[in-house]
Image (cartoon, rainbow, N blue to C red):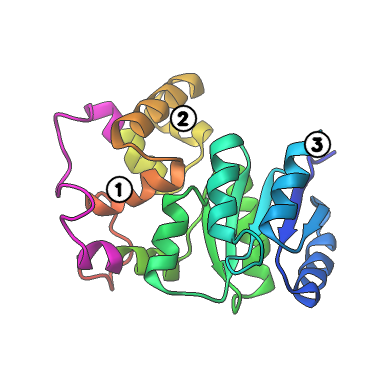
């Protein structure tokens, strides 16, 4: 029996919600527990339901409370709930802002249904997921504001050699179990390193660690990147 991933869809367009729901419910391991047409309804539902969702697909532009504000509130109160931004905005500021407030992934609405399903599964497994397009936008944003957000090059005094090893593997999108195998340490030790990394880099979640990794040039994204 495979564990089902419990999903909430938050979007103010009913047609879009229904379309996404139809797509996702065809997958054996995905289940939709609620649809919210604005951020307020979403927050109200989450604070009263006993069965918390694993993942929220979050539109940015919604009435009452928008997706950015809703993400902020939910991520603070329920950090274990993963939020995937799903939006037609591909502006760099939107993407970095959403990740700053705690989103685990960022999907553009012109993406393929296959990509949405893939992203949900990856986020469920690893806690975050970025496709090339989003990584590229994040990367450009970091270059254009370089130095403003974080002091450049990796602070060797801040992180231990082992923490850097773990961070590099997290950035390569390996799971905790895979990192443990690669470094010959226990998954609990990996978790410990990860928690230290979150504290030391002041990242809100694993997604933030990946951005830290890009900022510190730990990640070469693809050969066509001019790092």
- Locate residue 15: give its quadrant: bottom right
Q: Going by the picture, which residue comes out furthest to the bottom?
A: 110
Whole-angstrom CA distance, mark 3 to mark 1, is 34 Å
Indicate the position of residue 85 as horizontal and vertical percent values: 57, 61
Q: Nearer the viewer, mark 2 or mark 1?
A: 1
46 or 63: nearer the eye?
63
Q: Nearer the viewer, mark 3 or mark 1?
A: 3
Residues packed near mark 3 inside 10 Å, few (<14), some (14 to 19) or many (20 plus): few
Q: Magenta residues?
A: 140-164
- Residue 79 visible: no
Lower position in the chain sequence, tag 2 or tag 3: 3
**Residue pictured at 61% horizontal, 75% vertical:** 109
Residue that label 3 marks: 51
Indicate the position of residue 199 as horizontal and vertical percent values: 35, 29
The reply to whether the C-beta atoms of the residues labelled 3 and 1 are less than 8 Å apart is no
- Locate residue 64: give its quadrant: bottom right
Whole-angstrom CA distance, mark 2 to mark 1, is 21 Å
User: In the rendered view, does 119 fall on the left or right side of 32?
Assistant: left
13 or 215: nearer the eye?
13
The reply to whether the C-beta atoms of the residues labelled 2 and 3 are less than 8 Å apart is no
Q: Which mark is residue 181?
A: 2
Indicate the position of residue 181 as horizontal and vertical percent values: 46, 30
User: In the rendered view, does 178 fall on the left or right side of 148?
Assistant: right
Residue that label 1 marks: 213
Q: How many marks?
A: 3
Q: Which mark is residue 95?
A: none
The reply to whether the C-beta atoms of the residues labelled 2 and 1 are less than 8 Å apart is no
Indicate the position of residue 35 as horizontal and vertical percent values: 80, 58
Residue 10 inside the magenta-drawn segment: no
């Amino acid at each position: 029996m495979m564990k089902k991933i419990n999903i909430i869809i938050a979007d103010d367009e009913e047609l879009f919600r229904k379309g996404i729901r139809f797509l996702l419910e065809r997958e054996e391991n995905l289940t939709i527990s609620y649809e919210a047409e604005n951020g307020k309804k979403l927050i109200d539902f989450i604070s009263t339901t006993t069965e918390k969702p694993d993942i929220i697909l979050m539109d940015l532009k919604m009435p009452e409370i928008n997706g950015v504000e809703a993400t902020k509130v939910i991520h603070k109160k329920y950090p274990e709930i993963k939020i995937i931004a799903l939006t037609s905005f591909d502006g760099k500021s939107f993407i970095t802002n959403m990740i700053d407030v705690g989103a685990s992934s960022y999907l553009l609405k012109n993406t393929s249904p296959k990509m949405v399903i893939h992203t949900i599964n990856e986020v469920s497994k690893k806690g975050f997921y970025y496709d090339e397009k989003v990584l590229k936008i994040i990367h450009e944003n970091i270059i254009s504001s370089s130095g403003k957000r974080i002091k450049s090059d990796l602070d060797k005094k801040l992180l231990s050699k082992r923490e850097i090893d773990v961070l590099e593997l997290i950035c390569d999108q390996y799971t905790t179990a895979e990192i443990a195998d690669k470094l010959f340490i226990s998954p609990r030790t990996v978790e410990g390193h990860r928690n230290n990394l979150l504290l030391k880099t002041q990242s809100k979640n694993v997604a933030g660690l990946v951005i830290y990794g890009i900022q510190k040039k730990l990640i070469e994204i693809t050969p066509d990147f001019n790092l």
